[in-house]
Image (cartoon, helix red, strand yellow):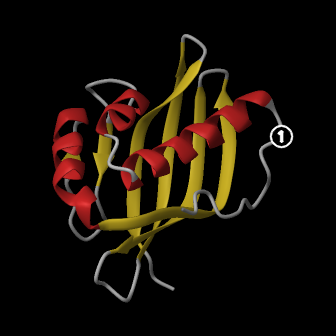
Amino acid sequence: MKEVQNYLEKPVNVDEREVAKTLTQLSVAVTQRNLPLLSSLLFSDASIILRSAKRIRAFNKQEYMDYVAEFAPDIQSLTYSDVLVRIEMTNTAIVSCICEIRLRNKLIPIRNKRLITFKKFNGSWFIHNAEENEWTA
């Protein structure tokens, strides 16, 4: 299984590496259908995940977990490329990347640009918000 494919800038400090590790865990959790791990990566019940620009729909943590539980069996792989990790403040990080989802029995992968906000709490990084934009290239 492929995880994070490549970085625009390799994470250099401890916080950037920890955020990158959390992003890899997200890929593993979705691909392996590990819902407890996925839930543990989301910051709080107030975390907001937006599906796409065309189908604007905001999910709170439980709605997102229900959506992934339904959709996960069709996912063959989830990879990230052109990953750029930026620590904005001591407890906030922003990741921009291109996400590619390969579905079983589909020839063309789904690609979109993502902007993911991470929050640091008790020394660990959690996903706080995620926004998706349709791939236009």
Query: Element type at marker 1?
Result: loop
Q: Quadrant of residue 47?
A: top left
Q: Nearer the viewer, residue 75 or 67?
A: 75
Residue shown at the point (51%, 42%) measured from the top left: 25
Q: Residue furthest bottom?
A: 107
Residue shown at the point (72%, 59%) measured from the top left: 7
Where residue 2 appears, as percent x and y from the top left, is 58, 63
Label 1, residues with CA under 10 Å away: few <14, some 14-19, many ≥20:
few
The residue at which mark 1 appears reads as 12
Where residue 121 appears, as percent x and y from the top left, is 52, 16
Q: Nearer the viewer, residue 15 or 26?
A: 26
- Horizontal placement of 10 versus 115: left or right? right
Q: Is residue 43 above or below residue 63?
A: above
- Horizontal placement of 55 versus 108: left or right? left
**What's the residue type where badge 1 is placed?**
Val
Q: Residue furthest right?
A: 12
Q: Which image quadrant: the N terminus?
A: bottom right
- Horizontal placement of 91 versus 74: left or right? right
Residue shown at the point (34%, 41%) measured from the top left: 34
The total of numbered circles placed on residues is: 1
Residue shown at the point (19%, 54%) measured from the top left: 57
Q: Is residue 114 above or below residue 66?
A: below
Q: Nearer the viewer, residue 18 or 121?
A: 18
Where residue 132 appears, as percent x and y from the top left, is 39, 60
